[in-house]
Every structure is written in structure tokens, then in C-alpha cells.
Amino acid sequence: MPALREKERDGEGVGAEEESENMVCRDEDTTGGVRVADEPEMSDEAEHGVGSFEGEGSVGMESDEYDFQEDETEHNHHAEADVDNGDAVDLEDSLDGAVGMSDNYAEDEFYAVDSVESLGWIDFLNLSEEDVLRFNFADVDIAFEFYQQYAKHHGFGARRSRSEKRGEVRIRQEFVCHRQGYRSPKFYSMPNRQKRPRAETRCGCPARMLLHMDDESGRWHVAYFSDAHNHHVLELRFSSMLPGHRRMSEADIEQMNDMRKGGISISRIHDFMASLAGGYHNVPYTTRDMHNVNAKQRREGGLDAESCLRYLRECKTNDPALYYKEVVDGEGVLQHLFWCDGTSQIDYQVFGDVVAFDATYKKNVYLSPLVIFSGVNHHNQTVVFATALGADEKEETYVWLLQQLQTSMKGKAPVSIITDDDRQMKSAIEQVFPEAHHRLCACYESE
């Protein structure tokens, strides 16, 4: 594989003999990597080799305080990525005949990358190990995106691994193949395991990229790079489905949100995306990824809560008697919600002498108890008086719900309240409706 020729820097000529003494030594590594200098060794003391740097590359270690730790940012998501070995190709064969850098960088000795957008100019498929060593980055996140793109084009996944700090400043960061390390034995000896462990995907792959930060410029330089894997890698058309490379674009997320508002299911939306892209192999995400994005939006943006409150406000314009009340916490997250319409209030005035007070136990996707106040009309039909969502099943939550029932029904108290055998409900009833008779449901009396 052709290597790029070293150039003279800052106009200073270097003789042939001096150049051989001063230029950085690049010895072939036993794992297939290329060394810029004597690589600092890392002692393996934990599952993924968490340890400390040793050797000539760690000058000043004795005088400065260093904190060496594992970076878990991408660890959980890429820890158990599966690789389809049946469709794999050998990476070394795929690199034979590589021409090196893209034409955009062919005239430079060092390649500075200042933004993620700049990565679009790089020909990752034909990028050699020697070329990677010439890059430097504005920050470590851009460097990780660079390694992600390289990994995607060469058939493997990437994740962050160990980092080194000097005080509070991170000065080194390591990126590794998603199959680096081994699964801890404790996961195979867990007591009372109900599911069989996932298939083992870690194989101790040595491929990695080590970066260090230049103290003067603050830029991140590639100190060591190895693309030698001990496993097969995927073809480019399959590598996009590795967990580390599956992602939805902003346009696809907006399209999904618009279709969800129309009541279209996630699976149907994925089918639609595949038809637009020309096949499922051209869609770089699965239905599970779409569900994850949808759930993340609910957690961070409160989309469902906002939609619910907006719907109740719209209903109140058509039904002025509708009553609803919500409680939010200090972070603006919805905790409790109570509502009843005008028809339910009329039914309660007529049939509200006996009220069934029932709470389901986290049967919805929000893991919030659904509380229903219901009764029976003169046709022996069930009528719903009010409905509520609570954050939990504590006594204070039930007290708040019964107070809202009392307020919405103009202060009318039921004669009898039927519940299950719940002590928190019983205590709440005694506080809000002390004159009401508390009765248990027939199914609990039979027990």
C-alpha cells in the first residue's frame, strides 16, 4: 500500500542523515497498526482493559495527576452489536490497491478537520492507515464521527473506550472496534436469570485509534491507529445496519411525526420509507430504532402530554362544562391529570350514589396508574364519571384525585365507594369523604 511522502515543514530543510535521525519512527506493529512514536502501553485491569499509560509516551506522569477511566458514552448502545459473518469480507483484501487520500487533501501534509461537514470530502473507502495518522481535529466529538465514518466504510462498528485526564482536562481518548474486549463472566452467572444471555459478540478485537490533545493548539491528533481485526468485517451495504451506524435523519423524524399524527403505525411508516428509498436495504434504521426515537421524544419533549392538554382545551371550547386539572413537577413533567366532561357530571348527579374507584397497575406505556371513577345507570349499564392519570399509587395521589372528583361534581359526596383491598385508597377516602361507606369489590370478598 503506497504511503504518502513526508514534506518539509516551516521552510526548514533537513538533510538526508538528519532526517533519518529526526523524523518520527514508524515501525510496523505486530497487530497491523502504524506507530507515530513509541506507543504508550495500557495495562489491562478490568473487563475492557482499564488501566494506566506506561512507557516513553507517558512523560510527566509522575509529576501530574491523571485520571484514567472508561468512557461509557457509546458503550451501552454498541456493546452487543451483532455481526453477520456469513456476509463478511476480509478487510485486508478490501484494502489491496487502495490509492489513499481523496484529491481534496492530496497536497497537504497534515489534514485539519474543523467540522463534521468537512468529513464529506474524505474518501473513507480508500483511506490508508498512513493517511489516518496525518489527521487532526478541532474536538474529540468530530474525531469520533471521523472514526464512525471510517468504521462504516470498512465494515465494523465503533465505540468510545478509555480516556485519560490531566486534572479536569481530557488529554487522550481511545476509540475501538465494537467487538473489542470480552463480556464479563458475571453476566453468565447471574442468579435467577429468566432469559438466556445474548450471543457473545465480543472477541477482543485489537483495532483502535488513539488520540492525544496538543497542549498549545488544543487540537486532537492521531497518535496511534490500527485497522487489524481478528474477525470478519461486513460489506458496505450491510455495515449500515450495525447498531452504531443505525440512525434517523432529521427529515425522516419529521416525516415519522407527521404520519404518526395521522394514526399510522410505526411498521407502516417503515414500509413507506423503504418504498421511497428503493428497498429496505437502503433504510439505515429498523422499526425498533423508530420506536426508540419516538419514546425519546416523549421523554424529552413531552409531546404526548402537550397533545393531551391541547386536546382537552379544544374539547372545552365545545363543552364549557368539561373539567380538567393537571399537576407538573419542577422540571415541567406532567405528574397527575384529572378530567371529566359535562355528560359525566350529569350522570354523576343522578347515578353517583355508588362509585367504583379502580386503578390499573401501570398497564400503559407510561407506567402510570390509570384511575377510573364509574357507576351503573338505570339500565344496568356502566357509566364513567371521571378519569385520571397518576404518577404513582401513594396515598397523597389518591387524596388529590378524590379532591378533584369532589370539586368537579360540585361538592356532592357518594354514599358508598367500592374499591379493591388497597390501604392507600381506604385512607384517602376517609380523609376526603369521611361519611361515605367503604365497600370492597365482590371478587375480594369471595377471597
Image (cartoon, rainbow, N blue to C red):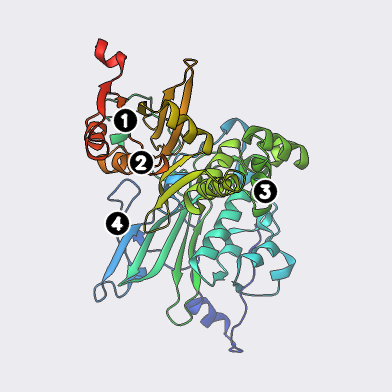
Cα gap from disc 1 to disc 2, whole angstroms: 59 Å
Q: Is residue 361 left or right of residue 427?
A: right
Q: Residue furthest top?
A: 446
Q: Is residue 234 above or below residue 42?
A: above
- Quarter that holds the C terminus: top left
In primary-sequence order, the first of circles 4 and 3 is 4
Q: Are marks 3 and 2 in contact (CB under 8 Å)?
A: no
- Closer to the observer: label 4 or label 3? 3
Q: Quadrant of residue 210?
A: bottom left
- The residue at 46%/15% (across/down) is 380
Which mark is nearer the camera, 3 or 2?
Answer: 2
Say few, some or many: other residues with alpha carbon within 10 Å of mark 2 (under 14 / 14 to 19 / 20 or more): few
Dot 1 or dot 2: first in sequence order is: 1
**Residue indicated by mark 1:** 188
Give the residue pinned by disc 4: 51
Name the residue that disc number 3 marks. 252
Numbered disc in front, either 1 or 4: 1
Disc number lying in front (1 or 3): 3
Give the number of the mark in front: 1 or 2.
2
> Marks 4 and 3: CB-CB under 8 Å?
no
Which amino acid type is shown beneath numbered disc 4? Gly
Q: CA distance from mark 1 to mark 3?
A: 39 Å
Q: Which numbered mark, 2 or 4, is in the foreground of this view?
A: 2
Task: State how far apart marks 2 and 4 are (Cα).
Answer: 67 Å
Please provide percent x and percent y for residue 262. Answer: 68, 40
Q: How many neighbours does mark 3 have within 10 angstroms: few (below 14), some (14-19), or many (20 or more)?
A: few
Q: Which residue is mark 2?
A: 411
Residue 193 vs residue 10: left or right? Answer: left
* Residue type highlighted by circle 1: Tyr
